Image: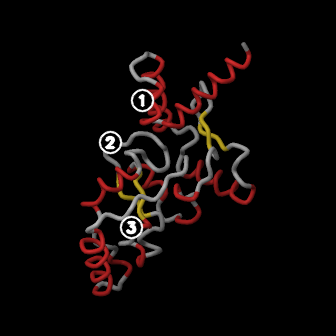
């Protein structure tokens, strides 16, 4: 994971999502009814705000989903708030479920809290994670399967291999899988310091 800046709210979001969504909630107060999807037409705005990177795996996500950081089940009042939306891979969104604040928010991370190890491509915590956030960070890695789940490792391996084969520059890798690019830079710096 890495920090993301909240993207600006799209101009028509209030009119097309917040207002009709909140009207729907008032007419349907029963939580068992779920929520009506007014947000999907704005997924591309969200994807653009995340540079088409999943907010959790931090890799290029061609499709992705609108993820409610605070779940619609637990926070119906936030279902139609732009500030509660994140861009995420579908399987990661499903893994998060209704855990809400138990998972780190991509908008509240510090720089370099996580790094990828080479050549294993595992995602690990760094010493920069504040002590009061370490348990939550560990839980996030485990619950979202970001450390070394086969799905996320296979993606990382593909991006890394494209770079190793010369099919993707380091600059290109920074756009598609920035944590892998950082790991390569760190490795290159270590090698140059040894010379």
Please give the residue where the numbered disc 2 appears in the rendered image: 62
Instruction: Identify the element where label 2 is drawn.
Output: loop
Q: CA distance from mark 3 to mark 2?
A: 21 Å
The residue at 53%/32% (across/down) is: 180
Q: Residues within 10 Å of mark 3 (few under 14, many from 20)?
A: many
- Number of the front mark, 2 or 1: 1
Residue 81 in picture, x, y percent from top left: 39, 71
The residue singled out by tag 1 in the image is 172
- Kindly identify the residue that appears in the image at 48 percent across and 43 percent down: 58
Estimate the spatial distance between the alpha carbons at disc 3 and disc 1, rounded to whole Å. Answer: 29 Å
Vertical arrangement, residue 136 with respect to residue 125, above or below: below
| Mark sitting on residue 82 | 3
Q: CA distance from mark 2 to mark 1?
A: 16 Å
| Horizontal relation, residue 11 to residue 72: left or right | left
**Element carrying mark 3:** helix
Q: Give the mark, 3 or 2, whose residue is nearer the N terminus.
A: 2
């Amino acid at each position: 994971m890495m920090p993301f800046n909240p993207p600006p709210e799209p101009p028509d979001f209030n009119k097309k999502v917040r207002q009709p969504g909140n009207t729907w909630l008032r007419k349907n107060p029963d939580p068992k009814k779920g929520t009506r999807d007014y947000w999907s037409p704005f997924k591309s705005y969200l994807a653009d705000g995340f540079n088409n990177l999943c907010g959790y795996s931090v890799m290029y996500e061609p499709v992705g989903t609108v993820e409610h950081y605070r779940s619609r089940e637990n926070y119906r009042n936030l279902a139609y708030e732009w500030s509660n939306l994140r861009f995420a891979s579908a399987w990661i969104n499903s893994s998060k479920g209704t855990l809400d604040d138990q998972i780190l928010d991509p908008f509240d991370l510090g720089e370099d809290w996580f790094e990828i190890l080479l050549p294993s491509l595992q995602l690990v915590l760094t010493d920069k994670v504040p002590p009061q956030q370490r348990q939550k960070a560990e839980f996030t890695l485990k619950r979202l399967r970001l450390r070394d789940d086969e799905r996320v490792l296979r993606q990382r391996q593909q991006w890394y291999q494209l770079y190793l084969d010369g099919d993707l520059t380091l600059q290109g890798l920074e756009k598609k899988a920035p944590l892998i690019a950082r790991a390569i830079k760190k490795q290159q710096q270590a090698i140059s310091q040894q010379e």
